[in-house]
Amino acid sequence: MDSARILIVEDERIIALDLKEQLRRFGCEVVGIHPDAESAITAVQELRPDLVLMDIMIQGPVDGIEAARLLRDTTHVPVVFLTAYSDDATLARAKAADPHGYVLKPFKERELYSAIDIALHKAEVEKNLVEHKALLDSILETIDDAVISVGKNLVIRFANPSAQRLFGLNAEQIVGQEFDAICQLYEDGHKRTVSLFDSELGDSSGRVLESVYLLGEHDSVIHVQGTVRPVTNATGGLDGYTIALRDVSDVKRITQSLSYQANHDSLTGLLNRDSFINRMARSMALHSSNPSETKETSVYLYADLDHFKVVNDVCGHAAGDELLRQIAEDFDAEFSDVDLKARVGDDEFGIYLENVPEDEVLLHAQRFYEMICRSFEWRTHRFSITSTVAAVPVQSETSDPFRILAAADDACYMTKENGGNGVRLYQKSEYSFRKRRDDMHWASTLNNAIDEQKLVLFAQPILHIQSREIRKKEILVRLRSDDGTYVSPGQFIPAAERYNLMPALDRYILKQTFQYLRDYGSRDRCMYCVNLSGTTLTSAGLYDYIKDLLSEFALDGSRFCFEITETAAIQNFAPTVELVQQIRGLGAFFALDDFGNGFSSFAYLKNLPVDYLKIDGSFVQHILKSHADRAMVEAINNIGHVLKMETIAEFVTNSEMISILADLTVDFAQGYEIAVPEILTPDATASQVG
């Protein structure tokens, strides 16, 4: 109460001055003394005191009760009545002015103090309540959520502006109506109404509303989320409910749009690859857990357009896009009763069919194929569009869609290798499919082996027949498996050739060989022979790579001989000749490997700048028994010598063969009779055999 500013309205001067003195002792400040209502009201409006002490019977036409009522309506300054009247009529009139206290004269000082203290406290509480209410009113006026208050009889008591906008009604049309008459909520996807006010709701913390909607104007659907919470009275009993609803229609539309975009191909409107695979996986898992006992199966049909790139290259991507849209439109119409249809690649489409009789799988595949094949016109150009279709029956125990897609890719790839434009049924037991699977496995394994340096180099000595010295060693490669055993190149090289991994493999071998010679090459003076595949020969930058390795490891090019096959040399003859001449310019040598497989290569041999001719082992291994093979070895050897090339016989398995090769003047011999391949280690440097 200290420093409270108080205005006194009292027409008896002595009493007023006595009040002023008492208030001073209380620590209050008297801001004015007025004998009548008119001057008092003016002073209150100007000074805004904390409290007015008001005598009821004062001078003038307006008494204290009426003055207090006017102050309440205009200034909200609290009033405490000081009066000698306590009759019922006066009390009734005083109550109508909402005073904060009523003190009867004469009063004791302590009574006055208590009355003023209580009045000031009450005024402060009311002020806080008014401010709090104003804050809540402001929030309810401005928030986007619709807030509705209903009594326990479910009659609406309040609806904020957002609620009025949501229902399309004003407050007068809403308040006083039963809630169900204004708002009916339904579950998403159903016409089933939602019961908001369960009997047990009054004893709980309420409920959350999700996936519900109400009907707006013209039966438009308005999706909402919200809460329903019970309101209790002072005794803890149910007084009603507060419902908060938020219009999430825009969010729902955006979410649905984003979901559609995330799951569908923007060009064709079909499912995209990821969504298709996810849905196919769910379907496969369901069928795996509930296998059918009938002769029906699920089947994945996969189509890859033949020569789609030609359309893009000739007419541009706009033409290609239009072709894909036309196919997608026909696809959707032809298989309108099937949900799982997708564009699974640039020019690839897929469909997953369930409950297909086993004898009708190829019929559906043919139907898919015929739907895609068409004549496509773009301006002045006309194209005959064909497709390669693969059909993969799905076994009941299979639940991995990626295996199914990989199988379809296998079937399609092998069909395209034979020209495409047809339908192929994937059969797991067929050798060609198993071979492709093995190749893909080895391709992956080889990639990892290169990255993790699990490839091990071996060296097989090559004997100079006349001097009986080891003058060369051929570098061979093995793959070390996880159990420590070595895998021969015959198992993984075909996969490396098929999946274009030979350039990476050859460069790995080159670098490891060069590094070995830098570290341990001084222990012998052998020439090291490294095989280069046909794809490596045509890969960009091979010359620079070898040149950089020679520089990096400070090696002489004459320590190396690069072996190439006659097939690789002839298929890319002109660029191969140029590359060989460049690398020979670094001091290195070249050998033509497996010579004799193609007899027509004699016409090219005289123009191929190689230093050594390796006679194919298929002739050498039979020279003891076959006069024809011996004659072939002799002919190749003689031609090599005429062309100033030294010759190397492969597959030498016994000493008698060495004697015959010596008689034929073959220069070198290689095979198990000379030495088996050994791991390239610092100890593998023997230069002579007995």
Image (cartoon, rainbow, N blue to C red):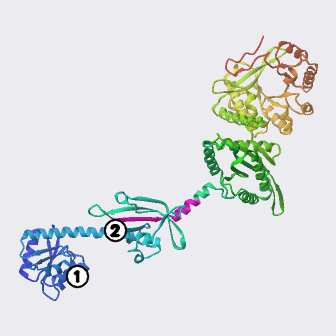
Amino acid type of the residue tagged 1 in the rendering: Leu
Range of magenta residues? 239-257
Magenta stretch contains residue 479:
no
Instruction: Give the image quarter of residue 174.
Output: bottom left
Residue at the extreme bottom of the image, as rendered? 61
Q: Where is residue 394 in the image (x, y as percent from the top left)?
A: 68, 43
- The quadrant the N terminus occupies is bottom left
Rendered position, 563 above or below 22: above
Residue 33 can be seen, yes or no: no
Rendered position, 187 above or below 82: above
SS class of the residue under badge 1?
A: helix
Question: What residue did someone put label 1 on?
Answer: 70
- Residue closest to the eye, 498 or 283: 283
Q: Position of residue 274 (x, y in %)?
A: 63, 50
Magenta stretch contains residue 256:
yes
Rendered position, 304 above or below 229: above
